[in-house]
Image (cartoon, grey):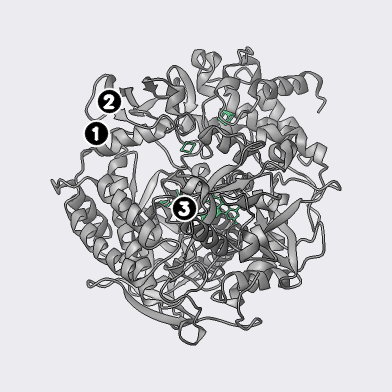
Amino acid sequence: MYQKYDAVIVGAGGAGLMAALHLSSAGRVAVISKLYPVRSHTGAAQGGIGAALGNLEEDHWEWHMFDTIKGSDYLADQDAAEILCREAIETVYDLEHWGLPFSRTPDGRIAQRPFGGHTREYGKAAVRRSCYAADRTGHMILQTLYQQCIKHDVHFFNEFHLLDLLVEGGRCAGAVALCLATGELHTFHAKAVLLATGGCGRMFRVTSNALALTGDGMAVAYRRGIPLEDMEFFQFHPTGIYKLGILLSEGARGEGAILRNNQGERFMQRYAPTLLDLAPRDMVSRAIYREIQEGRGIGGKNYVHLDMTHLGREVLDQKLPDITDFVRTYLGIEPATQPVPVHPTAHYAMGGIPTDVDGRVVVDEHNTPLPGLYAAGECACVSVHGANRLGTNSLVDILVFGRRSGRHAATFMKQNDWPPLPPRPDERAAALLAQLMNTGGSERAADIRDTLQNEMMDKAGVFREAKGLQAMREKLQELRERYQRVKLEDRGAQYNTELVEVIELGGMIDLADTLVAGALARQESRGAHSREDFPQRDDAHWLKHTLAYQTPRGPELRYKPVKITKFEPKERKY
Amino acid sequence: MNVTLKIRRFNPERDREPWWGTYTVEAESTDRLLDALNHVKWYQDGTLTFRRSCAHGVCGSDAMLINGSNALACKVLLKDLGQHVTVEPLRGFRVIKDLLVDLEPFFAKYRQVKPYLITASAPPANERLQSPAERERYDDTTKCILCGACTTACPSFWANPAYIGPAAIVNAHRFIFDSRDEGAEERLSILNTADGVWRCRTIFNCVEACPRGINVTRAIGEVKQALLYRKL
Ligand SMILES: Cc1cc2nc3c(=O)[nH]c(=O)nc-3n(C[C@H](O)[C@H](O)[C@H](O)COP(=O)(O)OP(=O)(O)OC[C@H]3O[C@@H](n4cnc5c(N)ncnc54)[C@H](O)[C@@H]3O)c2cc1C
Ligand code: SF4
Ligand code: FES
């Protein structure tokens, strides 16, 4: 089926909805999403959105910017980080004006709490910067944006799965998606396409990410010759519920919760004497792994304790009600009286589709844009998070750059006409479906996925080294071969969710490839990328962004410089 | 433990009538029902169809009828369900395939109550002020994830599918009692119609069904009070 729109947004999480609000008034705009918008994983965000409002104590966007850069281990592009922290403030006020039910201070202003790596006066002490609505900040953001989209009559195509991007004559000409309800392919002919498809945490065994977070947008772009930036930087959040990976927000530590080892020791004292449990995530996750490696896990097992028992029931019920409920529901533990077993959980992709500060997708080391193609949110890499994202900065990122890309695309689509479509625009998508539907293979997708997730966790997780990464590379080759013979039991057209899962798996294998290739090449430790065989940061050789391009021989790597404006790289201590 | 799942199946491309499929899975007692459903889909029958995403009770995808009560499959543990579990699609929505139902009428009703902040005045440069007590007034209903469990547990809704239903009323409540909102009158008149709030017979099924612990019946009661006394 053929449809013509001025612009198409793919993804209806925070980034996609924010873009839609700024784009849909400018023309005919379609938002396509594989999930109903309110099911997007932005709704799972808990702890808060960072903005230097200074409601409870002095704060400045410059401090926020410094923390972001330092947190990124100096890999963030500083021009972008400056925009992030400046525009965070008006963004939070916009949300409030749209009705977002923030928690409040006694004098009625937006409440703020401390969060990992956020400090006053360039690192002196923790600062209250995270604006929150209990531990449901993401839920409130997603609801509020969706409500505004209803108010402004945004046109949604729910349960449409992106399969391909159309690039013709050096311009993006639209997208092809599978309508899940009917099994039909739809070609969306558009002057501008904005990808806002979220993260890819499901390539790891233990993750805080939804089952739907399979990195589809990144994989589709990659297969169309667009590079992926900094994929080796994947954040492990320190406090996932033992085995399940369900997140217990840093907001818990922001409210005073403490990590303890099997001796009851507050071990973060040894790793980050100033910020302690509120050190950045990469550091805390490594500290937990070290404790476990050195035999100080609880009962000799691979977890530590998150101790919230001293916070009191009122704080738990008022400020952390959802995570309290998760602990009770899934562990049968009462966090007011018992410590909670936690370990790091795969959480956030710092890397993604490279863009400039207006969300335009850029395709090489000279930042050449691909006209008509935009990306925003977790699937994009601006890069404001560099090698390690600070808590609360993703919600800022998706909204600030969702808005900027929406605005830029609005101007672009007014100034440009529709590019021609290729003769058979859905050819590639149709071939992919035909191939999967007719393989008659014998490999179970679930087995391939289990292997992928387990091996990635062990070999490309918190700690990495050449040997494991090399082995992972070979394993991925094997998985790719097995995937050629993948079996499909559901041959139906309507709501073929098995087919969708198999497509998602294919994309994740490609993304894992880029992650492993980037990690193997990068012979240093920086932020979330920690090489046992190269424990030091190496600015002389590696203060640069990775770009991974797809080739028949696997990912080809190129590099581009980091933009440094205000803060020269320094050693990172907390 | 071994768990036997009896699942209501229907594939529009294959079946004329719904049927029961029975599956045995080996699972931990602390597994979620969603884990067991995934296990069936991934290792026994790839055609089994249901919605899911977050897997921890915050996205609202997987509300279904589990041993006769509405719940999220990702928020109930097998140990609380016993060794024989019956799983059916939500009642009162059109079944499309297996456990997956048509949500369009549900969202249409949600949209009907104007679920967005309505204000006449221009906002200040910074935030609008709202005291913690004013914020607390509508806290309960901000938690809704639009899973549909309440509406499809409601006998008034089964009897009359035109009834706007508890979920839409909950979302109207969220704005009616927000001190910043000025659209209460509009919403109240929408809810004051034949298929509006008065269809509620205070049966309380919705409260039991709500996975977010929202006191749905109380919220509906407060909207009724507001209508009777127009006092917010
Ligand atoms: C548990 C948890 C807690 C978090 N807490 C915080 C926090 O407190 N503060 C913070 O700053 N960050 C937090 N984060 C990170 C942050 O929430 C996410 O990075 C952010 O919400 C991502 O938003 P997004 O709009 O990019 O993507 P998402 O909200 O994930 O949305 C992706 C959208 O893309 C659509 N989509 C995906 N693939 C396809 C396809 N193939 N076809 C069509 N549509 C597709 C989906 O349907 C969905 O609508 C948290 C993350 C998690 C997992
Ligand atoms: S009120 Fe509760 S049961 Fe009803 S839709 Fe909202 S979350 Fe679901
Ligand atoms: S899968 Fe999200 S609520 Fe169950």
Which numbered dot is residue A11? 3
| Ligand 1 within 8 angstroms of badge 3 C-beta | yes
Mark 1–mark 2 Cα distance, whole angstroms, equals: 8 Å
Instruction: Tell me, yes or no, if residue A417 can be seen here.
Output: yes
Q: Which residue is mark 2?
A: B23
Taking the view exactly as shown, the residue that stands out farthest to the right is A107
Along the line of sight, the residue nearer the viewer: A309 or A570: A309
Q: Tag 1: Cα neighbours inside 10 Å, few (<14), some, or many (≥20)?
A: some
Residue A187 x %, y %: 33, 54
Decide if ligand 3 comes within 8 Å of the CB at mark 1: no
Q: Quadrant of residue A548?
A: bottom left
Q: Residues within 10 Å of mark 3 (few under 14, many from 20)?
A: many
Horizontally, residue A236 falls left or right of residue A134, namely left
Tell which quarter ligand 2 is in. top right
Q: Amino acid at mark 2?
A: Tyr
Q: Chain of mark 3?
A: A
Q: Quadrant of residue A188?
A: bottom left
Residue at (82, 64) in percent of width and height? A58
